[in-house]
Amino acid sequence: MSEFIQIEIDPNLCAGTEECGKCVTVCPVNIFEPGSPLPGISETNEDECTLCELCLQNCGPRAIQIHKLYED
């Protein structure tokens, strides 16, 4: 588990990497990994998240949530 960011994908909303996979392709720091049926989260890269929100903007069903594990 990462120290700063926790990323969750709702399996009830995600269309999966085969039908969509936009989160995998748009993430500039490769947090998402292709998986079957859902994309996986790279535990080694999760804290590299820059909060660019490209994954959120490209997720049609809004299946991704990013939680900050620190105070602003």
Image (spheres, helix red, strand yellow):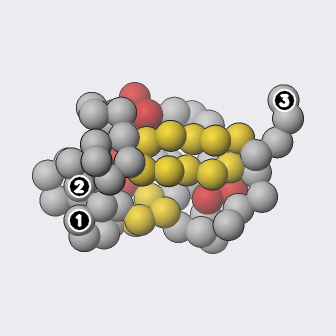
Q: Position of residue 15 (x, y in %)?
A: 21, 48
Indicate the position of residue 14 as horizontal and vertical percent values: 28, 47
Q: Which residue is mark 2?
A: 16
Q: Which numbered disc covers residue 11?
A: none
For residue 61, what is the image quadrant? top left
**Where is residue 64 shown, x and y percent of the image?**
43, 42
Is label 2 in a helix, a strand or a loop?
A: loop
Q: Amino acid at mark 2?
A: Gly
Residue at the image point whose x is 59% and y is 69% from the top: 43
Residue indicated by mark 1: 37
User: Foreground: 71 or 48?
Assistant: 71
Residue 11 visible in the current orientation: yes
Left or right: 17, with 47 as reference point:
left
Q: Residue 72 — which label? A: 3
The quarter in which the C terminus is drawn is: top right
- Where is residue 40, by image quadrant? bottom left
Instruction: Residue at 51%, 58% (x, y): give it.
Output: 31
**Where, quadrant-wise, is the N terminus in this rendering?**
bottom right
Total numbered labels placed on residues in the image: 3
Residues at badges 2 and 1 in contact (C-beta under 8 Å)?
A: yes
- Mark 2 and mark 3 lie on one chain; the one further toward the N terminus is 2
| Above-or-below relation of 35 to 20 | below
* Three-letter amino acid code of the residue under disc 3: Asp
